[in-house]
Amino acid sequence: MTDAECAIAHVALLSLVGRARFSADTYSFQLRRVHCGAKPVVTGSTLRFADHVDRRDRQIEISVSAFRPSMASRTPSRTAPDPIDLIVQVNRGRSPQLLQRKFDAMAQDRFVFLRATAMLGHRAVDLAALPAAPLGWVCGDLHLQNFGCYRGQNRLVYFDLNDFDEAARLPVSVDLLRFLGSICTAAPGMGMERLAAGSMMQLALGAYAAALARGKAFWLQRETASGPILALLKQVAARKRRSLLAARTHVVGPRRQISLDGARYLPVPGRAAVRAHIGHALQALADQFADREFFRQRDIAFRVAGVGSLGVPRYVALVRGKGDPDRNALIDFKRAVASSAAQALPQYPQPAWSNEAARVIGIQDICQAASPAYLSAIFLGAAPFVVRELQPVEDKMALAPLARRIDRLDETLQAMARLAAYAQLRSAGRTGAAGVDDLIEFGNELRARPRRWVDAARSVDAANSAAFATFRTAWQTGDERLHALCIVRGTGASGPGASKLVGRKVAAGKFRAHA
């Protein structure tokens, strides 16, 4: 492009901005297209670019209104925050005993650390250094272990994104970079070289971009899946409720009780009050789903699960289900807290949700092809909780064994990347999110210039590695800020390995198995 052509484009774009028909963000986006070699043709309030970079040499027509509400503003660069201060901020007020377990596990494994520090990851990403991305509904913590099987309310078994605790309306690149970065972070633990990780990231990025560019959301269940994901779906579909009950409960007389094993399930502090709150919640669920017998309470326990949310109040209720004792059901109650992704990126305003549980299930409902059985938002006392049924079909993909067959691992990662794109397409245009056309355009941008995104994902991994090293040193050397969170009232005890305060010490390997 000649200097004269570039000047014409600048004047035309500034004219449109002056007429309030173009936002400043759109102007920046289109100028990047100009400098990449797209020749502008201005007709009234429409810009057409003859894009010779595109291998199909197609004409790209862009309406001035298409990007106005949907393109995310570029954020200013900022200095990296102290990772320990941020970790303390996110975990303040959580169960001291469970924070012992969490910090022990975080200090032993880079990937566990990444899973536990979503806010830290988002704060470390420099969105200003990347092209503007459309605003969309993102899960906010998209990593390799945020995919799994579940049974929908329609009783079909799906493989999809399955954790929306951090969900928010943010640039779709937030999920993309966290997902690609997690590939790089997890690779050494699967016995793979960095070069192989780079190749996998490029293939996953290509799959995500192609899915966005196609503009149509699909889903994965037995009839539509292939490869390792199909094998997992077939495996879990054969599991029975009785096997789940046998692993988590035991029979005493005519009824079951939850097995308090010190790993998955613990006694409930303040049992009488919590039992009353859960009883009221189960009554509300019985009314909502018109099934009073199913939700009759049998037992309750404190549930230990997850990594990032560990230490947040979480309970499981054993209910009558379809009959005592072998057709009982387990109902999970998880306290909903503010999205750390939204908190890390406050320049992107969020809708006013009635409560945090309503946010989680509202976004999950529009992003997933089908919601898990009994997914609901409910209050225990004054606190919002997300409710769902625990199911025998729930499982995550074991990626490490696939590393022996790189082609099968690549196939799985590409399928996960497509699922992320499908979720964003499915929720496009909802409550301020970008429309499908904007996501298609972004997909084409990714396909044309993928390298900057792979480089940015490597930066995400590098930032995680640096923060992990800082945290491990701080935890192992007794950093006062961390250990103050782990002091159990009445004991004054804290420190690495002090998980025995809840009855037994759980090895990090066992912790990861139940995460």
Image (cartoon, rainbow, N blue to C red):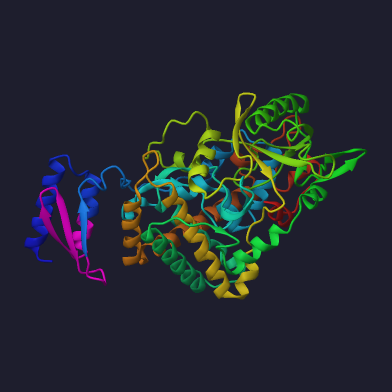
Spot the residue most to the left. Answer: 4
Residue 270, located in which quarter of the rendered image?
Answer: top right
Residue 139 can be seen in this image: no
Of 177 and 470, nearer the camera is 177
141 on left or right of 326: left
Of 215 and 409, nearer the camera is 215
Residue 48, located in which quarter of the rendered image?
Answer: bottom left
132 on left or right of 97: left
Residue 227 can be seen in this image: yes
429 on left or right of 52: right
Of 434 and 222, nearer the camera is 222
* Image: 286 above or below 415: above
Tell me where residue 155 appears, x and y as whole percent.
Answer: 64, 49
Tell me where residue 230 appears, x and y as whole percent.
Answer: 61, 65
Tell me where residue 318 appears, x and y as whole percent.
Answer: 77, 38
Of 275 and 213, nearer the camera is 213
Residue range of the region highlighted in magenta in the rendering: 31-58
Query: Measuring 65% from the left and 66% from the top, which residue is drawn there?
Result: 231
Tell me where residue 337 appears, x and y as whole percent.
Answer: 56, 35
Count of marks placed on residues: 0
The quadrant of the picture occupied by the N terminus is: bottom left
- Does the magenta portion include 226? no
